[in-house]
Image (spheres, rainbow, N blue to C red):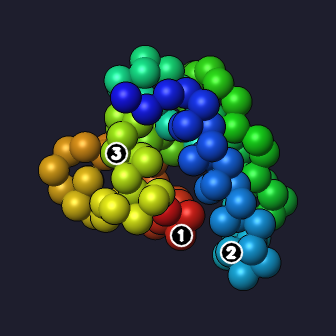
Amino acid sequence: MVTKDKILEVLEGVRGQFEDPATKSKFKGFDRTLQFLFTDLKTSFYTRIHDETMDPFTEGELEKPNLLVTTDSETLVGIMEGGLSPLDAYSVGKLKAKGSMSDLMKLQILM
C-alpha cells in the first residue's frame, strides 16, 4: 500500500514539473484550485495554481475545488512513474476528474 508520505513525494514531483519555464508559460493567467481525493487513503491534498506558480500541496479538502481528481494512491503513483497511462486509468474508471474540459486538458500537461 502506498503511504501518505509517498503521495506527497509524488505530488511534489508534479510541482517540480511545473517549475519548468516552458510548463509555467502554459499556465499564464490560470487561477484554479486543484484537489486530489485518494479513495484508499481516505484523504485529500489540494493546491492552487496562480500567477504562474503552484502552491505546496496541503492535506485537507476544499469545499468547491475548480478541479477534482479522484483516484487511489497506486493509480496516481503508476501514472506519475510512467507505468500507467492517464487515459487508460480514466477509461477503466480508476481515475475520475471533475472540472471544465479546458482546465482538465491543461492539467494533463502535468501528468
Say if 46 sits above or below 107 in the image: above
Q: Secondary structure at mark 1?
A: helix
Q: Are marks 2 and 3 in contact (CB under 8 Å)?
A: no
- Residue 47 appears at what percent x and percent y? 68, 40
> Mark 2 packing: few (<14 Cα in 10 Å), some, or many (20+)?
some
Kindly identify the amino acid type of the residue bearing the numbered disc 1.
Ile
Residue with the mark numbered 1: 109
Residue 18 percent location from the top left of the image: 70, 64
Q: Which is more foreground, mark 2 or mark 3?
A: 3
Whether tag 2 and tag 1 are in contact, CB under 8 A, the answer is: yes
* Residue type for callout 2: Thr
Q: Nearer the viewer, residue 91 or 101?
A: 91
Lower position in the chain sequence, tag 3 or tag 1: 3
Kindly identify which residue carries mark 3. 75
Residues packed near mark 3 inside 10 Å, few (<14), some (14 to 19) or many (20 plus): some
Query: Percent from the top left, x then y, of residue 110?
Result: 56, 64
What whole-number distance in Å separates the C-alpha atoms at marks 3 and 1? 17 Å
The residue closer to the viewer here, 87 or 3, is 3
Left or right: where 59 falls relative to 88: right
Q: Secondary structure at mark 2?
A: helix
- Would you place residue 92 above or below residue 39 in this image? below
Residue, far top: 42
Q: Nearer the viewer, mark 3 or mark 1?
A: 3
The residue under the point 34% across, 62% down is 83
Residue 51 visible, this orientation: yes
Quarter of the picture holding the N terminus: top left
Q: Determine the image quadrant of residue 71.
A: top left
Image check: 70 left or right of 58? left
Q: Tell which residue pokes out farthest to the bottom in this image.
A: 22
Q: Amino acid at mark 3?
A: Thr
The residue carrying mark 2 is 23
Percent x, y of residue 13: 64, 55
